[in-house]
Amino acid sequence: MIETAERTANRAAARNLSLGILLMVVVGGVGSFLLSRARWWMPPGASAQAADIDRLFTTTLVVTGIAFILVHVLLALFVWQGGRREQAAYFPEHKTLELSYTLVPAAILVTLVSMGAVVWARVHQPAPAGALLVEVRAEQFGWLFRYPGADGTLARVDPTLINARTNPLGIDPADAAAGDDIVTRELHLVTGRPVHIRLRAKDVIHSFYVPAFRVKQDAVPGMTLDVVFTPTRAGAYEIACAELCGVGHYIMRGKITVEAQEAFDRWLATQAPAAP
Amino acid sequence: MAVTHTTHAAHEEHALPWWRRYIFSMDHKVIGIQYLFTSLFMAVIGGFLAMLIRMQLGFPTAKFYWAQWLFPGGFTNNQIKPDFYLAVVTMHGTIMIFFVLTTALSGGFGNFLIPLQIGARDMAFPFLNMLSYWLYPPAIVVLLASFFVTGGAASAGWTAYPPLSALRNAVPGSQMGQTLWLVALAILIIAFLFGSLNYITTILQMRTRGMSLTRLPLTIWGLFVTAVLMLFSFPVLFAAAIMLLFDRTLGTSFFIPSGLVVGNQLVQHQGGNPLLWQHLFWFLGHPEVYVLILPPMGIVSEVMTANARKPIFGYLFMVGSIIAIAFLSFLVWGHHMYVSGMHPLVGAAFMTTTLAIAIPSAVKTFNWLATLWRAKIRFNTAMLFAIGFVSLFVTGGLTGIFLGSPAIDMYFQDTFFVVAHFHFVMASAALFGIFAGTYHWLPKMFGRMMNERLGKIHFWFTFVGIYATFFPMHFAGIAGMMRRIFSTTIYEHLQGLAGVNIFISVAAFLLGLAQLIFIYNLFWSIFRGERAGRNPWQATTLEWEAPSPPPHGNFGPQLPEVHRWPYDYSLPGASQDFVPQTVPVSAVPAPVHGGAEPDGGPAS
């Protein structure tokens, strides 16, 4: 009598957990992803590499989604059955089964690694000739940009020359290339033209993150890092700092405008050269 | 020798004053329980800090009068200040990872279970063990004191990346707070190293007769390999912490390059490299997440097999994958640094090792599934948490595949997708391991059962609460929400996330409240719970041979002798559905299989 009550309770617990896993985790998990796709998703890709990265993301999402559903459905099924069985099996090992679920995930992961490596290599191509060279300099809590001007060369900088008002980047006026460098507070780029960014930081680590371009690169003090990408859609975009950099981290926003070459040239002409 | 030790031990217990028995005790069980309760205290603080974070992210414009009253320095106009917010974020991470999960799992369960499960009377070095615990409260005092110094607590994140953490005027928390943070961590690391040395020696040297390595319970395998990980990885963080301390106080330049300008002042350092810290930090930091997940894997295996009444499936593959995970965990740290400025080719190499570590993790998952297949499951609270662990580990593990791929990580690095990932696979899964272990072994610790009704309510609120809290964080991350930001309001691309963040915050508050049920149940059960017998779960491992709670010296005059592997559940031909490790093969024959051989089998 008592044993039967216990057994009924155990069955109910099995049913609840099994349904909990199926409804909350599988249905809820997959359902909320579908809902999220419509409402909270990546901003539409606006660079050449975005398509590659998004495709890789989608492939990974499908593969992991299948694994997620498969494991949870099996878990729910075994839980359900486990609540009603009278006698457990003695089944301590099965080498073939174990080897197969070692090798199958291994094969899938090798495939994902290969696909990932291809995209990663493509993202890190050196800048092509004719790329727009621009320096991006991060500081607490904002971004400054420098275009090389007619000579195509960014002048030497020296941190001891930094003056927040007159020479925020510390450009060395003794450098012959200094005269035509143009320092701006907004980043303007040209639709379809590759960009070669020289990324620097003045004080602490920041991170140059443009969600729409699928670009992120830490800006590390003491290092100058190359970021290469090609914006493909005209419009206004935002730079977000993605590395904790201090109290104003959350307001460290930068503005990007992507426009046609003529509009870009017009804008650049209105910006004054930096050096004294 | 065993006999003399016992008489000595029994004599010792009576002779010792109460403060040597319960406070400055050298008994591994007391030390384990001290570690567990101190961790619980810290979990309350760390959890409360999480609530403050969720208050700000979910309700950025609401006013919290009680919080202003509680933290007059951290709030202004009844709203949290950005610098205090960063201190809260930093301290939440630091406390939860080092002062709660590591201490509860290795310090708590490691101490309590190792001698009991291997059939030893105590640890190899009881004094060192006591010292290990007693370094923990001073570390806590130093850490929490940092809230009260000028500039407040450390605010450079739990990863403490320099130069932010190295330069005093970079962020308010980088004044005295960061120094105290480093000192607290250094003290705690010494405690961990004392513990690890002790565990490794004890497991290698003090196993009882017949307890070969292939007969060790998987909990012990998890704790053993964890101790090895800690011994190899924590000294690196210790060294890094000392170097950063030198940079901060003695003017060295390990991590600070030349030419920095902070607050319009040229920094007088040269020659350092901020990436050096990241390499050193993550060389610990990645093994550390396995320090937090291998013991729960062992605990879950133990709880699952006992309640499935079925041997753990694939014992050797289980042990093999623990070792494989541990080995690989030293080779994957660079996946935290794909966009750090490290060369992209190095990133590609780290991608390979990172995705390789998913293979043994998958093996373990499938082995748990196979253990549950054709089982006769007893759904007690411990088992619910063990099954919940598998779900959380899978959910969190799969998002790791996204982050392991550098091109995808370029988008997701430092977003809430990462926050979701590690809160599933490491934080929540480890927490579920702790809960499963507590419901399972509390009867052994205190001789009382935990209340099952409250336990089940606690499980359901926690399981649903964790999914409701952390699953939507994926969506915030996919939408591009950066972690550690005080407010989402100024960014165009984060405008639609207010609803998601409110949902997450409400779920987090409920999840936090549900833990009060656990705390109530814990204390109620310790004093009022139903009395537990020696072996309430009809389990096979050695700790269930000892009385509940075990006396000083654990076992009677004779240490138990082991004759078989730990998982003979539902053995065909046996009179009951479990055969303890101490039952000789002459009494109940054991089938020969590839895992742990019984006496007379090829491996013994």
Image (tube, coloured by chain):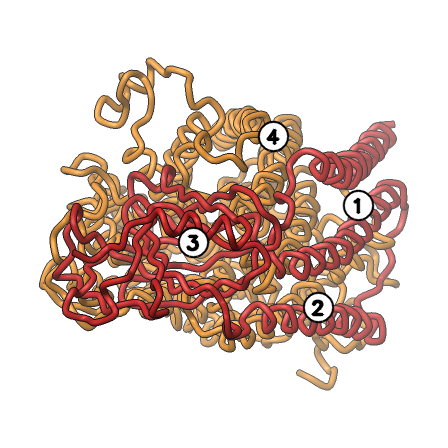
Q: Is residue B502 visible?
A: yes
* Residue B575 horizontal/vertical position (percent): 83, 57
Crowding near the residue tagged with mark 2, few <14, some 14–19, many ≥20 C-alpha atoms within 10 Å:
many
- The disc labelled 3 sits on which kind of residue? Phe
- Which of marks 1 and 4 precedes in the sequence? 1
Crowding near the residue tagged with mark 4, few <14, some 14–19, many ≥20 C-alpha atoms within 10 Å:
many
- In the rendered image of the structure, the colour used to display chain B is orange
- Which of marks 3 and 2 precedes in the sequence? 2
Crowding near the residue tagged with mark 3, few <14, some 14–19, many ≥20 C-alpha atoms within 10 Å:
many
Disc 2: which residue: A112
Q: Quadrant of residue B130?
A: bottom left
Q: Quadrant of residue B162?
A: bottom left
Q: Quadrant of residue B440?
A: top right
Q: Name the front one of labels 4 and 3.
A: 3
User: Which mark, residue B458?
Assistant: 4
- The disc labelled 1 sits on which kind of residue? Ile
- In the rendered image of the structure, the colour used to display chain A is red
Cα distance between the residues tagged 4 and 2: 39 Å
Cα distance between the residues tagged 2 and 3: 26 Å
Disc 3: which residue: A208
